[in-house]
Image (cartoon, rainbow, N blue to C red):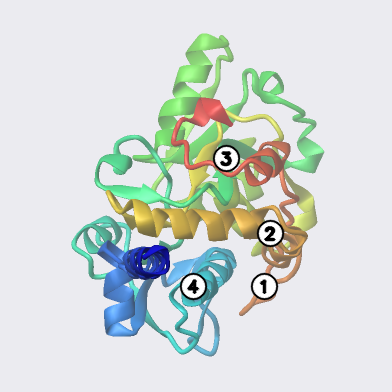
Amino acid sequence: MQSKYLKFGLLTLAGAMFAGSVMAQELTGTLKKIKDTGSITIGHRDASVPFSYYDDKQQVVGYAMDICAFIVNEIKSELKQPNLQVKLNPVTSATRIPLIANGTIDLECGSTTNNAERQKQVAFTPTYYLTASRYVSKKSSGITDINSLKGKTIVSTAGTTNLKQVSEANTALNLNLNILTAKDHPEAFLMVETGRAAAFVMDDILLAGLVASSKKPDDFVISADAFSKPEPYGAMIPRDDPAFKKVVDAAAAKLYKSPEMQVLYSKWFEKPVPPKGLNMNQPMSAPLKKALANPTDNPDPASY
């Protein structure tokens, strides 16, 4: 009798283990969609250098695309689908959030700021870049910090948060600035090039691109100090999908904490990038090093 009961017990245990194994493999949300369709759809930008853009061969390349490629490979491993098809879907500033929210794309790889308002509609990977409102000036100007801008003429682009930030700093620090507005970024940078303004205030990575594409990049310097706290960039993913976010976040953390991350960053921010061979000349900042070492999707600039 003991043998009979033991046999029954073992069969019951084996059945329970098998059921548990099946349950563990059950997928929901985005992971189920990806596995069922055999494909994952990546949203990308067309001209967000060096994050996500078309090169001269019309291939989508960039810092964010390389990070997302690593994440996709980890998803392939998780789902045991090495031949998972990767589909590319171009997005714009206006369409990127709706296309994530309605499930058209599964992962958006670009230069999207993670903030509390957007987190009401989408979720984000851990931060992979930090931008801030800084200024570019000529090295010959003698400008060393924000206080040394006092009494000078500076410019920013109309309709930007940067213009608002520098105006607030002007009042708070009693800088007595003469603040001009330009219709776009190239016009504002030209004003610094031609001496009509001492400095141009804008997102630091955009300034880096303008400097890199100028006739004499070595003539300019981007400030170390900023008019804003760091603003985090991350890749967008669907909201309220904890299983997918867990896989994506683990993949991002694995990359960020590896030696490969510094190599990847240097490739896009410290070396010439296609198609024009521009060099952003943007060494990794201390706040970004900290964020990569301790991956977080916190949208609060104060946390960085």
How dense is the environment of label 2, judged by Cα within 10 Å: few (below 14), some, or many (20 and up)?
many
Query: What residue type is disc 4 on?
Result: Val
Residue highlighted by disc 1: 273
* Tags 1 and 4 touching, CB below 8 Å: no
Q: Nearer the viewer, mark 4 or mark 2?
A: 4
Q: Between residues 285 and 57, which one lies in front from this camera angle?
A: 285
Disc with the residue nearer the chain's start (2 vs 3): 3
Image disc number at residue 42: none
Residue highlighted by disc 2: 280
Disc with the residue nearer the chain's start (4 vs 2): 4
Helix, strand or loop at mark 3: strand
Image quadrant of residue 66?
A: bottom right
Image quadrant of residue 272?
A: bottom right
> Is 179 above or below relative to 121?
above
Image disc number at residue 72: 4
Query: What residue type is disc 3 on?
Result: Phe
* Cα–Cα gap, marks 1 and 4: 23 Å
Helix, strand or loop at mark 4: helix
- In the rendered view of the protein, which quadrant contains the C terminus? top right
Q: Position of residue 201 (x, y in %)?
A: 55, 37
How dense is the environment of label 1, judged by Cα within 10 Å: few (below 14), some, or many (20 and up)?
some
Q: Position of residue 26 (x, y in %)?
A: 31, 68
- Locate residue 135 relative to residue 285 in the image: left or right: left
Q: Nearer the viewer, mark 2 or mark 3?
A: 2
Residue highlighted by disc 3: 200
Helix, strand or loop at mark 2: loop
Q: Between residues 242 and 191, which one lies in front from this camera angle?
A: 242
Q: Position of residue 70 (x, y in %)?
A: 57, 70
Q: Residue at x 66, y 43 (%)?
A: 288
* Cα–Cα gap, marks 3 and 4: 38 Å
Q: Nearer the viewer, mark 3 or mark 4?
A: 4
